[in-house]
Image (cartoon, grey):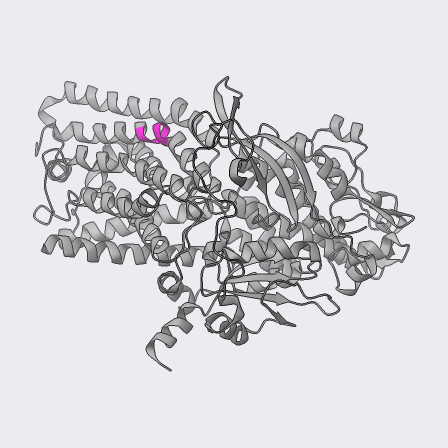
Amino acid sequence: MTAAIATLVLVTIGVAYLAVVDRVARSFVAGAPVGLATLAAPFRDALRDLMKERRPTERPDPVMWLGAPILLVTLVFAALTVMPLSGEAVGSDLSVGVVFFTAMFALIMVAAWAAGWGPNSKYPLIAGYRFIGLMLAYEMPFAITIIAVALPAESLALGKIVAWQQAHVWNVILQPVGFLIYLVSALAVAFSGPFALLASKDLAGGVELELSGGPRLLWRFGHRALLLSTAAFAVPLFLGGGAGPFLPPEVWTVLKVLFVAGTLALTGHLMPLVRLDWFMKTAWVVLIPLALVNLFLVGAVALLFPAWFGSGG
Amino acid sequence: MGLIERLRNFAFATPTAFPVVGAGGERAWNRLVGDGAVSRTTAPHNGDILLLTGLVPPSWNVPLRDLFETFALPRAVVWLRPAGADPTPTGLPVLSLDHWDAQTVRGALLDPAAVGWKALHDDVPPAEWRGKGDYGQGGEGMMGGKPYGRPMAMTMMDTDGLNLGDLPTGLGPFFPHLPSGLHMKLHLQGARVRECGEARFLEADVHPDDLLAVGVAIAPFLRATRGQPMAIRELETARMRHHLARIADMLALAGLEGLARRALAVAGDVDAPTVRDGLSEIERANAETRFAGFGLLDRRMIESAGMAGFAARAAGLPLDRRDVCEAYRDLGFEPLVEEAGDTAARFRLLVRESRQSLDLIARAGDKQSTAAETPTGPLSETAGAWRSATGALLAHLPMLLGGRLFSEAVMIVASLSLSNEEAMLP
């Protein structure tokens, strides 16, 4: 129960942080002054959503429509149960933690599709299946890089992956290409930054077009929490978990998560949305082969230097 | 003031507006967004204010009412009325203002007794839903047509040889980041536009003198067309503002919202160093990669259609009436061209021509010209009938949009620099 409350509080703070980063970055790029009003804007928006009426569309699928934001938030929190803040502070240190959180992220697709289908409206629907079209292109490199990270530790438990990095070397140094592929595909999983195709302006807002009131707030909360969580898993997978001098490991983990999440959030203001055809081609021709080469290299090192591998060395 | 009221004032201090930009309304809108007085939404459900700027032709009233009806409460319609604009849009609970007054707007927005809070339509479906009909319509084996008033998809072969539902639908007349009043009839197959049946602006037929009275953006060009010498500074300032607003639309469609706001802010400013910095930032963002390779309007198509102006220059044809004007030639003017003719080429040309306008403004002094070249292209009048580049481009839209992805189709339209003010001319 305590872990659940702590997760809720931390995620809410993280979401607020991402909303503020987003606003500040937008104002900065726009050349507008950044002041108290900029910092207050995300809270103003959230309050505004709570005070807005919820508008129905004609003949929506209410279960899918309302279920989408609930499913999104549920999946994010479910994934975060295996996220270790430190060796001790972890909701559930499953022996297959890696499989569990990637499975939760794979199911995000269902929430995205439901959000597109639910309102019975053409632009959300197009946004929904556009996202589905991208799925294989980003899920494959995402999964392959995670397998390559689990290989040195010879374990699918996040705690053991962190322990191996702390005993040997951080995966970001051992597999820098894998880290970059992870970040790109994490952005796509979280439909954020250049992959924010689910709620883009070229579809008049996509799945957010027909949302108003509480469900809109919940969807947007879930969306930011998803970006936060995909960024969060980069820390135990690549950045040595809570390793760092002077501060407690929990603090180091939180600082690293905020840094990665903030960096990912900035990309949306610096890079245009990707083209669907371009990304699919790049994913199949560049990202997936690169991720496989990364995996084979790590595998080769594991065969050549078996003593160096294994949990905790 | 109670707590709820305080929270409400805080929440709606910067209202979210869905803009509908009429003739002569672009500058007011750019200024509001640039100053951060309102934030923009592309989703009416999420809007607080339906913000009308400029002259609104009567033919827009019914679609505007339907649009406003989708706004969630609290909501209001605000019309930023330009001096000399008449008549007031009807059928809507309009708060008419000469200038932006945040307090008055918030008052209208948050007052539950305001007319804007009441439903304009009865909340009934447009046609009764009766499920499967006597001949199978509405059920399995959809056969097209409009059973019970609803369009039904009919399967057709798509480009990959698959049988895919074909959905007849409309785009506009107030689609975000496209000129207000533009309406298109499309057939969608998945995310692709199979066919664009028609592209036109809602009928307006406004007398040019009425457009001049409200200070439309094309006013200097209208006067030049009538043979009145206009200051080159004024012509080029209008061109640059128009281009920057189109750049902002394209950037927003490419997902670069902050940069789009910057383009709008400098469009309202027209201070040379600020605009130059803004344009450099836009070039650095490399947004054109999002637009490359589609929306091709090449040299051959332009020549066979006898088109000129902005789209022609983006396809490598240096067709510009300023080229034959002595005052412009004295300034060393030469038409800028791009070769590719696609959406990216038009985006690049918008940026380059904005910079060229800045240079011309700096060097023009008090030189005057009658070159009737609007930001979109040549404008002419024969016996009261006006011909504009917008009209010529509209005729080619169906050919350009057919077979494109929906998102590409929207970007193609945004890149053509269409002007609803030109379309309002008789």
Secondary structure character of the magenta stretch overall: helix
Is residue A155 left or right of A35 when viewed as pictured?
Answer: left
The picture places residue A235, in percent across and down from the top left corner, at 22, 43
Q: Which residues are magenta?
A: A135-139
Instruction: Give the residue at x 79% y 27%.
Output: B304
The picture places residue B181, in percent across and down from the top left corner, at 66, 50
The picture places residue A149, in percent across and down from the top left corner, at 21, 31
Nearer to us in this view, A258 or B389: B389
The picture places residue B269, in percent across and down from the top left corner, at 64, 62
Nearer to us in this view, A101 or B315: A101
Report if residue A136 is visible in the image.
Answer: yes
In the image, residue B309 sits, relative to residue A11, either above or below, namely above
Q: Quadrant of residue A207?
A: top left
Is residue A257 left or right of A136 when viewed as pictured?
Answer: left
In the image, residue B95 sits, relative to residue B307, either above or below, namely below
Residue at the outermost top position: B161
Q: Quadrant of residue B342?
A: top right
Count the marks.
0
Is residue A186 left or right of B10 when viewed as pictured?
Answer: left
Report if residue B340 is visible in the image.
Answer: no
In the image, residue A112 sits, relative to residue B46, either above or below, namely above
